[in-house]
Each structure stands twice: as structure tokens, then as C-alpha cells.
Image (cartoon, rainbow, N blue to C red):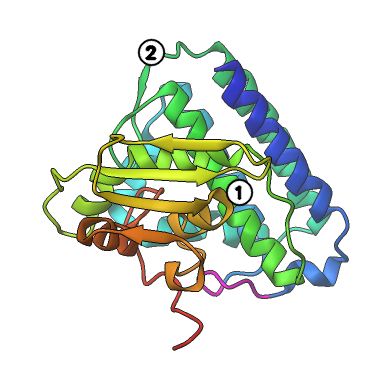
């Protein structure tokens, strides 16, 4: 728990530092995601961090609310943020993420925590908060035309993508494959990260930077240099998904 929470805080700080460089008008720049602005993206992160805290406290009312209003649940944070100044949104997010970090550090790593997809172990739950912070942060960087600096913390996104492989099949209405798929990545430091059987015939190779962007559906795999070997690996890379809920349309290849 200490490792993932430490890395979560570092990722939050990195995004916070970037956001502090933006002028107020830049918070209303459109991102590539769901017709949201930078303001909307950060407000969404803050709201879902609030929801995460409530779940850690044993309050699961948000599950019923989400079931009633569907995808409109994701608009709760952005709607709240549209009535705030950028500085107020930052304070909102800073306050709740401090609380989130404190709760996560006190949580039994073996605890199972409900979520909008399958329940998760506490470490996976913290990893999901890391993944969502990074993914929505990418949208903010894109809006401002700034290239983020990737770190080896991306191993957490790669891990949740690997663990969520069965969910990606299920949410797309596909039978979960029994064919082993191996993922071999190079982290930004040059170190290697891999999961899956060594003798798998279906393999995805490349940089963690590209694979993780595909897995959070911020880039189409055909716009990367990923090496995808085998029919099942090619089927999986089309549906790879790290987050709970419908897959959405994803990003189209730039060539189209």
C-alpha cells in the first residue's frame, strides 16, 4: 500500500504542478475527451476521489445513484466545477486527495472494496485512482499542447490493464479468452516490465508509454509502434480498457 499510495501522491503532485502553470482561460480549453474541458477533467477527478473516500468509509450510496442516472453520474463533478474558479477546483481536489491518501494508508491491503465494476482489492483500488488521475491528466496536457513527462510509475497502469483483461472482454460482450497473452514493455527508465506466460504465442511488445495510452483509450494502437503478435493479442489490443463502465468509442486512428 505504501508503494502505490506514494506513487499516487507523486502523480497527483505532478499534475497539480502542471495545472498551476495554466492561465485561468486555459482551464476552459477543450480536451479530446467527451467534450470536456480541462476544468471538467480536473473536477471529475476530484469528484471520483470523493466517491472513493466514501467507499473507503463504508458509504456506497454512489452505487445506487450511478445505477439510477447512468453515465450522467460522470457529469456530477464537471457540473460542480463549472461554478468554481480554477483555484477553487484545485483546493477542492487537494483537500479530498489528502483525505484519500490518509484513508488508503489505513486500509487493510487484503480488504475488498466495491466499485462500479467488479470489487477490487485495496491495492488495486489505489492503483485505479492512480490510473484515472494519469488518464484524465493526459487530456489536460493535450488540451494545452504540452507533452507530459512519463515515469516508471506507468507500471501501475500496465498492471491494472493486465489484471483487467477479462473485464475488457466481458464489457465488450465477448467471451473471456483462455489463450495466454503476454505483455512485454520498456519503462521510461529503460527497465523492462512484463506479465503473462513466457511461452505465450500472443504477445504485445513496446513502450509502456504507448501501451498505457492505448489501455486508457487515449490513443489508438495503430498510431503506435507496438508490436502485436497473434490473433488473440490483436483482438485484445482493440478492446484493452483499464476503467470500469462502458468502453466508449475510444480514439480513432489518425489515418482515418
Of 148 and 109, the residue lying toward us: 148
Mark drawn on residue 110: 2
Classify residue 24 as left or right of residue 98.
Answer: right
What secondary structure is marked by label 2?
loop
Q: Position of residue 74 (x, y in %)?
A: 46, 57
Whether residue 212 appears in magenta in the rendering, the answer is no
Q: Position of residue 42 (x, y in %)?
A: 66, 54
Magenta stretch bounds: 30-35
How many callouts does the rendering have?
Answer: 2
Of 91 and 13, the residue lying toward us: 13
- Report if residue 197 is visible in the image: yes
Mark 2 neighbour class, 10 Å CA radius: few under 14, some 14 to 19, many 20 or more = few
Q: Earlier in the sequence, mark 2 or mark 1?
A: 2
Q: Residue at x 58, y 69 (%)?
A: 36
Q: CA distance from mark 2 to mark 1?
A: 24 Å
Classify residue 221 as left or right of residue 6.
Answer: left
Q: Position of residue 94 (x, y in %)?
A: 74, 38
Looking at the rendering, in which quadrant would you find the N terminus? top right
Q: Which residue is mark 1?
A: 134
Q: Residue at x 48, y 38 (%)?
A: 128
Q: Residue at x 58, y 53 (%)?
A: 209
Of 123 and 184, the residue lying toward us: 184
Residue 37 appears in which quarter of the rendering? bottom right
Q: Position of residue 222 (x, y in %)?
A: 43, 72
Q: Height in image: 79 above or below 104?
A: below
Looking at the rendering, in which quadrant would you find the C terminus? bottom left
Q: Residue at x 73, y 56 (%)?
A: 148
Amino acid at each position: 500500500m505504501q508503494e502505490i499510495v506514494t506513487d499516487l501522491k507523486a502523480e497527483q503532485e505532478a499534475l497539480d504542478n502542471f495545472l498551476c502553470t495554466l492561465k485561468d482561460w486555459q482551464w476552459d480549453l477543450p480536451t479530446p475527451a467527451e467534450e470536456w474541458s480541462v476544468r471538467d477533467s480536473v473536477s471529475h477527478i476530484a469528484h471520483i476521489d470523493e466517491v472513493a473516500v466514501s467507499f473507503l468509509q463504508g458509504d456506497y450510496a454512489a452505487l445506487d445513484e450511478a445505477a439510477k442516472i447512468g453515465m450522467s453520474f460522470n457529469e456530477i463533478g464537471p457540473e460542480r466545477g463549472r461554478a468554481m474558479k480554477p483555484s477553487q477546483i484545485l483546493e477542492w481536489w487537494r483537500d479530498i486527495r489528502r483525505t484519500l491518501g490518509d484513508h488508503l494508508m489505513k486500509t487493510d491491503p487484503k480488504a475488498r472494496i466495491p466499485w462500479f465494476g467488479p470489487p477490487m482489492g485495496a491495492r488495486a483500488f489505489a492503483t485505479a485512482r492512480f490510473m484515472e488521475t494519469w488518464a484524465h491528466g493526459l487530456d489536460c496536457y493535450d488540451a494545452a499542447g504540452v507533452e507530459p513527462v512519463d515515469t516508471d510509475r506507468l507500471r501501475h497502469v500496465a498492471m491494472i490493464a493486465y489484471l483487467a483483461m477479462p473485464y475488457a472482454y466481458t464489457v465488450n460482450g465477448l467471451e473471456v479468452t483462455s489463450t495466454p497473452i503476454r505483455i512485454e514493455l520498456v519503462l521510461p527508465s529503460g527497465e523492462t516490465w512484463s506479465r503473462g506466460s513466457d511461452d505465450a504465442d500472443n504477445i504485445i511488445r513496446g513502450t509502456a508509454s504507448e501501451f498505457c495510452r492505448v489501455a486508457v483509450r487515449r490513443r489508438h494502437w495503430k498510431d503506435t509502434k507496438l508490436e502485436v503478435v497473434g490473433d488473440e493479442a490483436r483482438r485484445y489490443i482493440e478492446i484493452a480498457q483499464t476503467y470500469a463502465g462502458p468502453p466508449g468509442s475510444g480514439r480513432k486512428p489518425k489515418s482515418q
